[in-house]
Image (tube, rainbow, N blue to C red):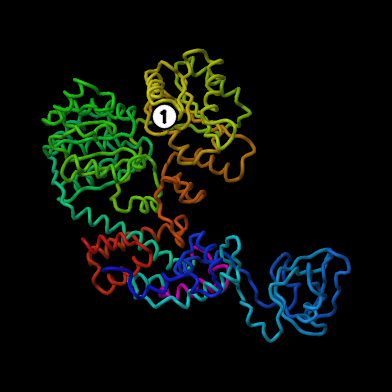
Amino acid sequence: MSGRPEILWPLFGELSKLDGVGPKTSALLEATGIERPRDMLFTLPYSGVDRRTRATTLEVTAPATCTVEVEVLSHTPNRQKGRPYRVTVEDAQTTFQLVFFHARGDYLTKVLPVGARRVISGKLERFDGVGQVVHPDFMLPAEDANTIPSFEPVYPLTGGITQKLMWKATRSALALAPDLPEWIDPELKKREEWLSWRDALAKVHSPSSMDDLSAYDKTRQRLAYDELLAHQLTLAVARAKSRRSKGLVNRGNGALQKRVLAALPYKPTGAQSRAVTEIAADMAAPIKMNRLLQGDVGAGKTLVALMALLVAVEAGGQGVMMAPTEILARQHLEGLKPLAESAGVVIELLTGRDKGKERQAKLAALAEGKIHILVGTHAVFQKDVFFHDLRLAVVDEQHRFGVAQRMELGSKGQAVDVLVMTATPIPRSLALTQYGDMDVSVLDEKPPGRTPVTTALVSTQRMEEVVDRLRKAVAEGRQAYWVCPLVEESEVSDMTAAEERFKRLRAILGEGVVGLVHGQMPPADKDAAMARFVAGETKVLVATTVIEVGVNVPNASIMVIERAESFGLAQLHQLRGRVGRGSAASTCLLMYQPPLSETGKRRLEILRETEDGFRISEEDLAMRGAGDVIGTAQSGLPRFRIADLERQASLMQLAQSDARKLLHDDPDLTTERGKAARVLLWLMEQDKAIRLISVG
C-alpha cells in the first residue's frame, strides 16, 4: 500500500475548492486546524437556530430567534445622526419594528416597500412591551420563504469566519464526500441502527432539532465510533506487533510465592490474587507481556509486583523494579526486603548515589546473577549495568516513564516482560485511550489494616483553629503534611507560598519541628528534608504537590490541604492517600477560600463522601473533561474532533473489543471489511498503523 486511496483524494484536496473559501478565508480556517475538506466535514455544528415560520411573534418568548410573515406598514428614517432607521411591520396578530443602524433609506425602501408581504427572520427582543428585530438575518418575498432553513446549524467560529460561510463550505464539502465501503461490523451497525458513513455526515450537518446535536444522538454516535475505531485499531495493531515479538516463557513453580504468602500478616485481597494470576499467565506465554496494573492509593500494588518478580526468579531469571525517584526506590526496597528475604531471595538497591567500589561490587553480583531482584531509579539504565538474565521489569508511575524508556529497558535483556504500575485510577474510557495497547489488571479492593481517613471541609477563615489542633496533635507525637496551593501567574510563586506558610508554622510550633519541600529546591535538599520527616525528626512537612506520589510515612495521620478548591479531584485523592497508612485514626482537612462555586463545592463534597478512587476519577472526568484529568500537556491524549470521551465512554470499550477482534480474524486487513478498515485508517490519518500492517 503505497499511499492514500484514490477514493479519498477529493477530501484531502485544497480548501479553496470549497464554495466561498478564498485564500484569505483559507488561512483563517487553517489557523484553527481546518486544513482540508475532510476537516470541514468533521467540524460539526454544536448548536442550532430554530427558524420554523410562526403565525405571530407573540408565540415566542423574547429574546429568541423568530421567523414570521409580515406586511410592511411604514418607514421612520433616522433624522439625526446616530439614531436608528425603523420599519414598522405587522404579523397576523401584532405590530413590531425592524431596526437598522447606519442604514441607507433608498436600499430599505427597495427591499421593504410599504404594503408588501415579506418573511422576516431574526432575533426578536422586547423594549417597553414593543417587539424589535435589529438587523434581521433574512428579509425575503413571501414566496421565497422555503429558502430559509427551518433549523439552521451553528458552527464553532473563529475571527473573520461567518456562519453563512461555514454553511456554504460544509455543503460543498459534503458534495465531495464519496460513498465509502463500510468498516463497521454489520451486526453492530444493524443493532445500533446506524446510517452509512456518508448519510450520517449529511444528516449531522443538517440537524432538524436540538436533539440531533446531542452526543447521544445515533448519527453522532456513528461518526464518533469511526474516530474511536480508527484510534483503537492503531493501538491494536501496535499491540499485535508487540505480541508477534517473541517473549520468553517465564513459568514459576510457586515455591517462593508460597513462602512469602506464609510470612504475610494478612491474606491478599481477591483483586490482588486475580491480578497475580493474570500476570503469571502472561509471563508464562511465549509473547512479551505488556500489562498495566492500575490500583487505587493503598490497594496493595507492591505485593502484586513482588509476586510477579518472584515468578521471574522462580523461572531462573532476574527482575528489576524501577521508581521515578530515589525516595520511592528506597521505599519500595523497604517494603519488599523483609518479604523477599523470608523467601531467601536477594534484593538490592541501585541509585545514582552508588559510587566507586560499592557500585562495582553490586554490578558484579548483578552480572553473575547473585542479585535476584534489583530496585532502582533510572540509574539501572546506565551503560555499565548488565544483568545475568533479566526477565521482568516493573515500572512505577507510567506518566514519568515513556515508551522510549520501555524500549531501553527491553534492550537490557531479551524480550523482557513489562508490568507498569500506576496509582492514578483512570476512568476506563481514558485508560483505553492512553493504554489501549496494554492489557489492564485493576486492584479495586483495599487490603485489611488500612484505617479510613476522615475528610472535613474547613474555610480558610478558621486557620487559627486548624493550627491550634495541629499543635496539640504534634504534642501527642503525631505527624502531619501541610500542602500549599500551586499559585497561578501571580506575584507570589509556589515557592513563596510554601516558604511563607513554613515560616509562620515554624514561629508557632517551634524550630526543628517543621520541614519544607518544594519543586524549586535542589534534589539533594529535597531528599534530605523528606528523609528527616520519614525518620520522624520533623513533625510537620510543608510542601507543594511534590509529595503526591508514593511517600509512605505510617506515623503521619493529618493532611492539611490549603486552597483545596484549586486542585484537581484526582490530585486531592492522591494527597489524601498519604495518610491513613498506620494504625492511628487519620484526618484530611480540605481548606477552601470562600465563596465556593457550585462545582467547587460539589467536587470537595465528593471527596468527603467517598474514598473510591475510581468513582472519584469518573466524577472528575464528568466535571472537568478528559484533557484536564490526565493533564493535557503530558497526556498524549489523541485529539478527537467528534468523539466526546466524557459522554461516549461506552463506545470506546466497544471500539476496543471490535478492533482487537477484527485484527484477530484478519491480521493483514485483506478481507472486504479489512480493506474498508484500511480506508478508515487513511481517512483518520492513522498512517502509522497502515505502515505497521504493510511491513508486518
The percent coordinates of residue 680 (x first, y second) are 35, 68
Q: In the figure, is residue 695 to the left or right of 685?
A: left
- The residue shown at (85%, 69%) is 78
The percent coordinates of residue 67 (x first, y second) are 70, 75
- The residue shown at (56%, 15%) is 507
Q: Quadrant of residue 400?
A: top left
Disc 1 residue type (three-letter): Gly
The one nearer the camera, 14 or 564, is 14
- The residue shown at (40%, 77%) is 178
- The residue shown at (61%, 77%) is 149
**Quick one: quadrant of the N terminus?**
bottom left
Q: In the figure, is residue 416 to the left or right of 542?
A: left
Q: Is residue 45 above or below residue 308?
A: below
Q: In the figure, is residue 686 to the left or right of 626?
A: left
The percent coordinates of residue 303 (x first, y second) are 27, 35
The answer to whether residue 474 shows anywhere in this view is yes
Which range is magenta?
195-216
- Element under disc 1: loop
Q: Residue furthest bottom?
A: 143
Q: Is residue 334 above or below residue 694?
A: above
Q: Is residue 529 above or below residue 328?
A: above
Q: Residue furthest top?
A: 511
The total of numbered circles placed on residues is 1
| Residue highlighted by disc 1 | 580
Residue 311: within the magenta? no
The percent coordinates of residue 130 (x first, y second) are 82, 68
Residue 215: within the magenta? yes
